[in-house]
Image (tube, helix red, strand yellow):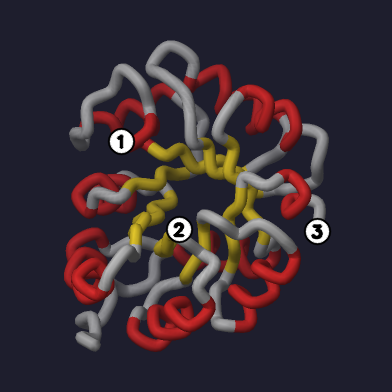
Amino acid sequence: MEHPPPSLPETTVSRSLLDLLEENPVVASVKDEEGLEAVLRTDCPVVFLLYGSVLDISSTVRRLKDAGRTVLVNVDLLEGLAGKEIVVSFIRENTAADGILSSKAFMVRAAREQGLFAVHRFFLIDSFSYRNLARQLSISKADAIEILPGCMPRVIGWVVADIDAPVIAGGLVCDKEDVIAALQAGATAIASSNQDVWRM
């Protein structure tokens, strides 16, 4: 497997994100209003917001922030906003979000340059996507990466060995056994929309 070039010097943002994930290894992925209401009834401090539109993202983020949560918005899933760097500026200037998630390297890099937490999402569906990971990360300079699906301990181990960034295992992390397997394989944290996992 290819190894990535040395990463950027660690920033205050990346250090604090790493600390946050190490202290709170279960991240709540919220994909609808029902999930939003549910996460507000838990103690889960870190939320990946996977839905919303240009009309309501500010108020949705504000509800979570008012409840003391750290919020990262998946900018790829926002309705009414084009997949351009201006979306990152919109999130920074018009919401109280702490950061963004995206599968697009240029969006992640823009977030980091603007002082937001920046998580690069990778869908590892085959060896080509795996080999492309290091090259994409060298462009994005992400604070952390999320690999999907996150229920593959062997692949998590490969990524942890090859990549110099915290790894979040996301997608299809369905129960306690999946969480334990991902963390034992070297993931810093897991992200799940399963409400039972949030309460572990």
Give the mark nearest the N terminus, 2 or 1.
2
Q: In which quadrant of the rendered view does residue 139 lie?
A: bottom left
Kind of residue at badge 2: Val
Q: In which quadrant of the rendered view does residue 5 lie?
A: bottom left
- In this view, the residue in front, 197 or 119, is 197
Q: Which mark is residue 163?
A: none
Between the C-alphas of marks 1 and 3, the distance is 32 Å
Residue topped by disc 3: 200
Q: Which mark is residue 88?
A: 1
| Residue occupying image coordinates x 59% and y 62% | 190
Q: Name the image quarter holding the N terminus.
A: bottom left
Question: Dot 3, how many residues are within 10 Å of its Cα: few (below 14), some (14-19), or many (20+)?
Answer: few
Q: Position of residue 19 (x, y in %)?
A: 60, 67
Give the mark nearest the N terminus, 2 or 3.
2
- Please determine whether, in this image, residue 190 is positioned above or below residue 198: below
User: 125 left or right of 181?
Assistant: left
Q: Secondary structure at mark 3?
A: loop
- Please determine whether, in this image, residue 49 is positioned above or below residue 144: above
Q: Find out whether the residues at labels 2 and 1 contact each other: C-beta distance under 8 Å.
A: no
Residue topped by disc 2: 13
- Please determine whether, in this image, residue 6 is positioned above or below residue 111: below
- Looking at the image, the residue that sits furthest to the top is 55
Q: Nearer the viewer, mark 2 or mark 3?
A: 3
Question: Dot 2, how many residues are within 10 Å of its Cα: few (below 14), some (14-19), or many (20+)?
Answer: some
| Residue occupying image coordinates x 53% and y 78% | 153
- Looking at the image, the residue that sits furthest to the front is 126
